[in-house]
Image (tube, helix red, strand yellow):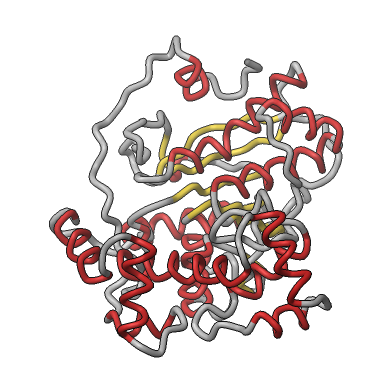
Amino acid sequence: MKSAKNILQPEHQPLKTAVLVLDESNTLSFAAAVDPMRAANRLAGRPAFDWDYISATDETPMLTSGLTVPSFPLARLDGCDLLIVVAGFQLARHATPSLLAGLRRIAASGATIAGIDGGPWLLAEAGLLDGHTATTHWEDLENFASRFPNVNSSTDRFVVSEGRMTSGGATPAVEMMLHLISARHGAGFAARVAGLFLYDGEATAARPQSRLGGHKHNALTAKANALMEASLDDPLPLAQIAEELGTSPRSLQQQFRLRLNTTPQDHYLQLRMAEARRLVTDSDLPLIEVAMATGFTSQSSFARAFRTAHGLSARELRQEELQAEPKGETSLRSDATAPRDTRTTATPLVVPSNTPLGALLSNRARPH
């Protein structure tokens, strides 16, 4: 296997990129990979990126929105500098021997391999993340770490690890692409690309994912939030959180009210109730285990808190989800403990090439 070419260095030649789009990928994750490249080409007035759309098979992939992506099969891809794997649902079905062999073939050529959303799962299934640090969506990190013990799993929003790039979702994928653009074309140019999307966050990987979003956090509340998320099953006392952060409970209370208009206790409960809802709808865990996983030692107290937070009981919500689930639905991820996909199938949508999105799909590297 060739060593991966370092694509994170100043370079004026177009980066030859292949975007492997799996059926049922999230539309936003797809756009997060592609649109920063399009914007970079537009601002540069020349191709900073030259990309093709690749499919796993001869069939045209369809995104969750119903958009179809014109592409050619991975088996016909001769090579590239960067392969971006965008995946979403039904990963067990996608992880075929031919797909995994194709990923290994491209990696062996010295290409950098990136995964977005469900992409890291497929890279890990192919053994391409062994010995690397990698991330995936926070919902799946625990299962990911358990299934792939040779991968150093991280909670960071995106991770770069010598020839590998992984992202926890769509917004971190934008940040990952801005990081790539900055490395190749400078921080100022990357900032201009970010400005086209009105994106004013940091294109840095060293930030943990947050279950409730973090746009209002300051450094103190963000660290407190991370401690809370790491201990949903055994809630930490406020005094202990404050002590670990080197502040007082009163100061922490003030910062949560100032930044998030809530108390640390209510914020912590909101995190636990969000996780409880996810486990009720996306797993088959018995409700008593859901209660324990979210820090409740009493089924009755869990039931009261769940109904107050979500307007119906956990049992009622699970029944609604089961009734809405399509027949024969399989698990999303590559193991039996993975959550269910209760999304209905979208109607295919063909985008005319004379529309902006149609131009993005059909005219790959041309500046727009």
Q: Is residue 3 visible?
A: no
Whole-percent x, y for residue 24 in the image: 35, 45
Q: Is residue 225 left or right of residue 137?
A: right
Q: Is residue 187 left or right of residue 193?
A: right
Q: Residue at x 77, y 65 (%)?
A: 220
Which of 261/190 is in front? 261
Q: Give residue 149's quadrant in the image.
A: bottom right
Depicted 8 relative to depicted 315: above or below: above
Q: Residue at x 47, y 56 (%)?
A: 118
Which of 320/367 is in front? 320
Q: Is residue 29 left or right of residue 14?
A: left
Which of 296/159 is in front? 296
Q: Quadrant of the N terminus?
A: bottom right
Whole-percent x, y for residue 87 in the image: 44, 50
Whole-percent x, y for residue 221 in the image: 71, 64
Q: Residue at x 61, y 23 (%)?
A: 365
Depicted 17 relative to depicted 138: above or below: above
Q: Is residue 85 visible?
A: yes
Q: Count all numbered tags in the image, as a single digit.
A: 0
Q: Quadrant of the C terminus?
A: top right
Q: Residue at x 71, y 60 (%)?
A: 207
Which of 250/67 is in front? 250
